[in-house]
Image (cartoon, grey):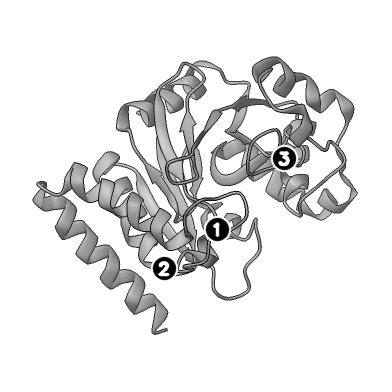
Amino acid sequence: MSRVLLVTTSMGTRWEAYSQTLLKLRVPEWQRVVVDGRKNWSPTGFIEHVIGYDVDYIVHVDEDCFVESREALLKLIQTFDADLNLVAAGIPDGGIYYRENNPAALNLFFVVFRATALRAAWSKREEWPTLAFCGEYATTVREQCPYLDERRIDWNEGEPYYPLFWSLMKQGGGFLYLREKLNSQRWSSLVFLPSGELMAEHLWYLRQWFSDEVMAGHDCSNRSRYESAAAEIRKQLGRNPRFWAYLCVMNLKRLLRRLR
């Protein structure tokens, strides 16, 4: 059985407790690490906290990304086991409602990394500032995601964490691009495997989750979006005593971390 580690960079919001509870329920056999993102945060800072773990895969999951399906997670890992060329999987960072950058790169809200490839890229992080997007990197995402909105793509637009992905591609590794669908009921992103199974939901705008204002492009406030997701989770799992027990424990852990 593959060894998997889940890592979340957290701002310590109540949504960390929900996301960690779902991970504990869905894949209790996987290790979990929560990195305090309130101090000295950087997009790739989580790597140094987990790179030394003896695992096969490292999965970065944001605290506002709620995993829906154990079966889909396991199928994704099995896809990596069957294709040793794969080094990362996630949502394209362009061509979708919320992201209009370079779709060859992945958005970090949910990414699976092959640990050996991530270690190799991390060992060469000094050269990351010299790395840039190459046109050939677009081939795979174009083949896997012909449905992307060309109006929401900027191949020349970048994020500080993109060199991580260019380093992985420079090694010759392949990417698996997951599918994203906008859930306009609460303006979230639903994440699907390429074969169609729903795996997770990401809510976006975590730092403004408590806002009662309606953002441009939405028809409801961020607070109502998040509360809607929480209500649906409670409706689905509320009769499971382990859900409430884990939720209490996860809340206690995050509150104690905030006191440090």
- Left/right of residue 115 with respect to residue 13 in the rendered view: right
Q: Which residue is mark 1?
A: 205
> On residue 1, which mark appears?
none
Q: Which residue is mark 3?
A: 165
* Residue type marked 2: Thr
* Residue type marked 3: Phe
Residue mark closest to the camera, 1 vs 2: 1
- Picture coordinates of residue 247, whole percent (x, y): 23, 60
Q: Do we see residue 147 in this rendering?
A: yes
Q: Quadrant of the C terminus?
A: bottom left
| Pointer 1 or 2: first along the chain | 2
Q: Which residue is mark 2?
A: 13
Binning the other alpha carbons within 10 Å of mark 2 as few (below 14), some (14 to 19) or many (20 upward) gives: some
Q: What residue sits 34% from the left and 43% below the top?
A: 30
Q: Tell me the element at label 1.
A: loop
The span from disc 1 to disc 3 (Cα, nearest Å) is 23 Å
The span from disc 1 to disc 2 (Cα, nearest Å) is 12 Å
Tell me whether the residue at label 1 lies in contact with that at label 3, contact meaning CB atoms closer than 8 angstroms.
Answer: no
Residue 147 sits above or below residue 184 on the image:
above
- Left/right of residue 43 with respect to residue 58 in the rendered view: right
